[in-house]
Image: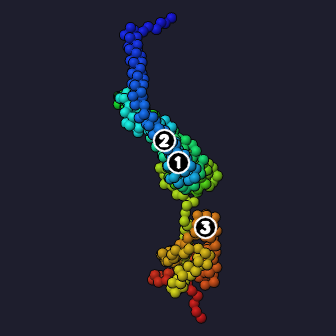
Amino acid sequence: MSTNTTSPAATVEKSFNADQAQAQARLLLQDSARWISDNWLQVLVALGAGALIVIVLLLVRRWGMKLAGEDRTGWGSVAGRAIGRTGLFFMVMLAAKLVDGYASAPPMVTATIEFLFTVAAVFQAAIWAREVILGAVERRTASDHYHGEALASAMGLIRLLVTFALFAIALIVVLDNLGVNVTGLVAGLGVGGIAIGLAAQGIFADLFAALSIIFDKPFRRGDNVHYDQTDGSIAEIGLKSTRIRSVTGEERIISNKNLLDKEITNNTRRAHRRASFVIGVTYQTDAETCARIPAMLREVVEAEERVFVRCGLIGFGASSIDFELLFDSAGADYAAFYDGRTAVGIAILRRFAAEGIEIAYPTQVNLNARADGTIVDPSPAHP
């Protein structure tokens, strides 16, 4: 069985604090009553002016809400949302702060108004900053018409982090204005934040990588990408990992941080796809015909509605004179590029056949030599 004991000193201290608070409250009421009875006309004028200020601020807030409804994607919507979140308590305290000097309020009333206005202004500034930051983020995502399955989760996470950070700062500012020593509190929050960050650095790394993917948009759901030795389409972007459907059918899962650490090729955003052919003709092809081959291949490419890049002789092979042909297919569609490359190849075969140009293939010629080392002519002797 336990008993709670309170020391006489603690009891006296609590009683003293309560008595002191009651005395201050009585003093505030007495000063206020005396001030109102001595300056009733100024008080009425101040109340009227304060009421007018509140009415004007209410109209401004209503205008901000209307602006947010009319302009849903522009900066006007961001400003309107911030103005629309102006609180009534802040309006009242702002009006009291503005008319306080005219009414010649006693020091206790002035100090009370000053304190309440500080609290209202600090938290109202946090609300405005929160709306502006979130509105800017939403506008950034909407400007490119981005729709991702992780966007709602990401916005929820951003909203939580921004709200916690801003209101924590506001609370510290208010406590500092009350005369509380916040150095230890700030240090404790810093140490706690570092400890949490170190303990969950892997999770936070993937979370921030997911936010980078969502807002920087290196790729989106459905895009065809290539990284390392993998080709596939983005199946899902999560807050921890991204799922990629490989061209061979399997689903590959990679953490967002590891994915962004790699070089990613987004094939969906290609302006064009480039094809190249190395074509070897036989050494029996005369020089004049070889000189016409680049122009000939250009005609073939343009006839198939592809973009000719360049063509030229690149070397003398073991059994062929080699030409390189480069041409582009507009757009990122791989199927169209594949079919176009086939069409150009078939057209080259037809054109070479019509021109009598032979495409070389690997050959080996054996020659006989006489005893003195001279080559025996393999062609039949003429009669």
The residue to which callout 3 is attached is 337
Residue with the most extreme bottom position? 383
The residue under label 1 is 64
Instruction: Using the image, tell me which numbered label, if any, was put on residue 218.
Output: none
Image position of 4 with respect to 29: above or below: above
Q: Is residue 266 above or below residue 15?
A: below
Secondary structure of the residue carrying numbered label 2: helix
Question: Which kind of residue does numbered mark 2 sit on?
Answer: Leu
In front: label 2 or label 3: 2
* Image location (x, y in percent) of residue 376: 52, 84
Q: Quadrant of the C terminus?
A: bottom right
Residue 179 spot, x, y in % from top left: 35, 28
Residue at x 61% of width, y 78% of height: 303
Q: Residue at x 51, y 84 (%)?
A: 291
Give 257 or 5, whichever is nearer the viewer.
Answer: 5
Residue 306 can be seen, yes or no: yes
Q: Tell me: residue 20, above or below residue 355.
A: above
The residue drawn where x is 47% and y is 49% is 261
Mark 3 touches mark 1? (CB < 8 Å):
no
| Residue type for callout 1 | Gly
Identify which residue, 193 or 236, lies in the foreground: 193
Discs 2, 3 touching: Cβ within 8 Å: no
| Mark 3 closeness class: few <14, some 14–19, many ≥20 residues within 10 Å | many
The residue identified by callout 2 is 52
